Image (cartoon, helix red, strand yellow):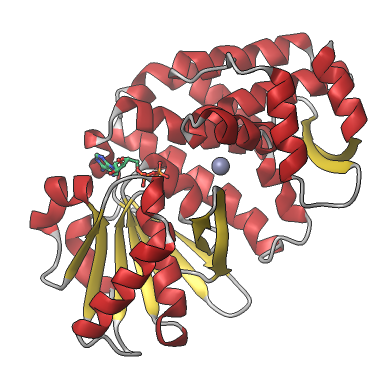
Amino acid sequence: MELVEVKGSESFSQILIGESIDNLKNYTSNSKLFIITDGNVKRLYSNRFPIAPLYCIEPGETSKNFQTTIDIYRWLLENNADRSSFIVGIGGGVVCDMAGFVASTFMRGVNFGFVATTLLAQVDASVGGKNGIDLDGYKNIIGTFNQPKFVICDISMLKTLPPIEFANGMAEVVKHALISDKSMFDDIEKNRIEILALNERLIEYLVTRNVRIKASIVEADERENGLRRVLNLGHTWGHAVEKLTGIPHGQAVSIGLVFAANLSLEKGLLSLDERNRLESILSNIGLPITTDANPKHIFEVLQKDKKRDNELVHFVLMKGIGSVEVEKINLKELEKFIQK
Ligand code: ADP
Ligand code: ZN
């Protein structure tokens, strides 16, 4: 088992990689437990949950809404939850975002932790203390920054994950490699078959490296003031694709990474060979690298979504593999690039 501590200004989180769900009780300090999960995770694993009131949401992003939040608050009240209660989310990103938001707002905040059961949740949602729900098609538009006490990343639980969901998580893994770890990129290329076969030792190693990368970036910029922007690599274009087409986040990020690579190539920051290596690694993992959606329509969504200063968009570009820079790009320039 590997332990990574993430220090925030007000609290710190322990990420336990390779720990088992069976040891969950060791981390909740005798408090009264309340468990939130989704239907799939419940069906597969509830026989291993500690005995506690259980709230089960429907699987999928559409559960991250106000109605579900209110239903959970009521359930907590009906079950006599108080300020000393401890909320545990057991599931993927959806469950963790939801459980973290409920715990951060119920009675002005109660302690919470996660058992992250998807690769995406283990390498991404587990670190950073962001939680939230969606409103009117805007993802995570309502939420808080608040760190869980612990995140258990039980690698063996990934065995039941549909391959497509595993691939979605790999998009963020490749992103982290592109941001700051060329040797991880090489390792994924070399060990792809074993990774996709879920070799537990390799996955534990991979999750640990990813958690460390994300933790170091988040620690340097807990509230997303600037530095943390590098984590948006592939996401500016990716989010627009996701919004327009409704494809899963990881797939949209994969398409967004290739878009960022092509723009970096155009600007002379990335070589053709490096761009090609990225395309191969993503498609070999089973991720899409192109979309049928009209680039003009994607651009329109991107433009509309832009909450930032005037005509400029902060775009994360690749400087070779393992290094990035954030450039303010004029929307007109981006539009021209798309029309090429
Ligand atoms: P994310 O990809 O953000 O983690 P979700 O929380 O929606 O997204 O999880 C993706 C899907 O995988 C959901 O349908 C969820 O129920 C399912 N799931 C989560 N964990 C497991 C698991 N260990 N085995 C099988 N299915 C799982
Ligand atoms: Zn993402």
Kindly identify the residue that appears in the image at 68 percent across and 37 percent down. Answer: 233
Q: Residue furthest left?
A: 47
Ligand 2's quadrant is: top right
x, y (%) of residue 152? Answer: 33, 58
Against 18, is 173 above or below?
above
Question: Image quarter for residue 30?
Answer: bottom left
x, y (%) of residue 35? Answer: 24, 67
Q: Quadrant where the C terminus lies? A: top right
Question: Image quarter for residue 254?
Answer: top right
x, y (%) of residue 32? Answer: 22, 83
Question: Image quarter for residue 160?
Answer: top left
On the rendered structure, is 115 left or right of 320? left
Kindly identify the residue that appears in the image at 54 percent across and 52 percent down. Answer: 136
On the rendered structure, is 114 left or right of 182? left
x, y (%) of residue 293? Answer: 61, 18
Against 178, is 56 above or below?
below
Against 128, is 209 above or below?
above
Q: How many marks?
A: 0
On the rendered structure, is 37 left or right of 114? left
* Of 74 and 169, the residue lying toward us: 74
* Of 197 and 118, the residue lying toward us: 118
Q: Is residue 149 visible?
A: no
